[in-house]
Amino acid sequence: MSLLLIACIPLLVIAWLVGGPLLVERRHERLRAKPFPAAWREILERRVPCFGRLPADLKRQVEQHVQVFVAEKSFIGCNGFEVTDESRVTIAAQACLLILNRRTDYFPKLHQVLVYPGAFLVERLRAEPSGVLQEQRHALSGESWTRGQVIVSWEDVVEGAAIADDGRNVVIHEFAHQLDQVKGYANGAPWLGSRHRYPRWSQVMHEEYARLQQQAMAGEPSLFTYYGATAPAEFFAVVSEVFFEQPREMHAAYPALYEELRSLYRVDPVTW
């Protein structure tokens, strides 16, 4: 390798660091500027009822984000599931609710969305009190991996979208995990836009997480599923589902928590 080429390498790296994001953003702008297909809008109106309740500006944002998401993310059918525009648009629209009203890099760690027809089985090792590792099977409706995949059950995607006020939405749940996992791991603390916001976030989330754990142990009713009491990362994903699907109930019962999520997601579903 010539000395001239070696000397140019740092300049090439700098050029990419400066120019690469600009090229990506220009590609996103071109995708967002395309007319939204009428067939895709029909899918949104039929499969994603909450889309119809959005203000006009948020509807347009969802459509623009869907065009980028579908163009850049690979959808893979599993166990015989056939991926179509219907499944792509239905999943993408719900995921994009989490990135409205901001400049976004569209879940940058995510490369593939794997879609099963229904609940899928995973095998996990569990340590028994004796120290022996026991293999167990679990049926899941969704998972989010730091390796660049989200896995969902189409049956649960459809049900989660169709019943828009039950606080259960597998797409919102798994893509909340994606936001949390951008840093390489999930701990219930996604990027908030400023380091100064974390003390308040940590205080509110810790208090409400502990409250849910107490309710779960006592068998008391809660707006949130007990699954949210298993880990801070799961609590964040569970409360994100409720924020978008039962905002009025959440605002009334958990005003501080609602405010933290409103600031994070930059939308106010109570007004929809």
Image (cartoon, rainbow, N blue to C red):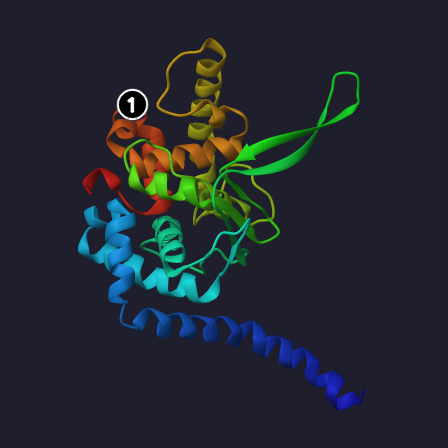
Relative vertical location of residue 166 with respect to residue 271 in this rendering, above or below = above
Q: In which quarter of the image is the N terminus?
A: bottom right
Residue at (29% x, 48% y) in the render: 48
Q: Where is residue 198 in the image (x, y as percent from the top left)?
A: 47, 39
x and y percentages locating residue 240 in the rendered image: 39, 37
Q: Can residue 172 be seen in this view?
A: no
**In the image, is residue 62 above or below residue 174?**
below
**Kind of element beneath mark 1:** helix
- Rendered-image quadrant of the C terminus: top left
Q: Which residue matches tag 1? A: 253
Bin the neighbour count of mark 1 within 10 Å (Cα to Cα): few under 14, some 14-19, many 20 and up.
Answer: few
132 or 25, which is in the foreground?
132
Estimate the x, y position of residue 264 in percent, counting from the top left.
Answer: 38, 44
- Indicate the position of residue 57 as horizontal and vertical percent values: 21, 57
In the depicted structure, whether residue 4 falls above or below residue 64: below
Residue at position x 40%, y 65% in the image: 68
Nearest the eye: 237 or 114: 114
Asked whether 62 or 86 is in front, the reply is 86
Amino acid type of the residue tagged 1 in the rendering:
Ala
Say whether residue 106 is visible.
yes
Label total for image:
1
Residue 66, located in which quarter of the rendered image? bottom left
Q: Which residue is drawn at 47% across and 24% down?
A: 209
| Up-down relation of residue 99 to residue 268 (above or below) | below
Q: Quadrant of residue 7?
A: bottom right
Q: In which quarter of the image is residue 185?
A: top right
Residue lying farthest front? 80
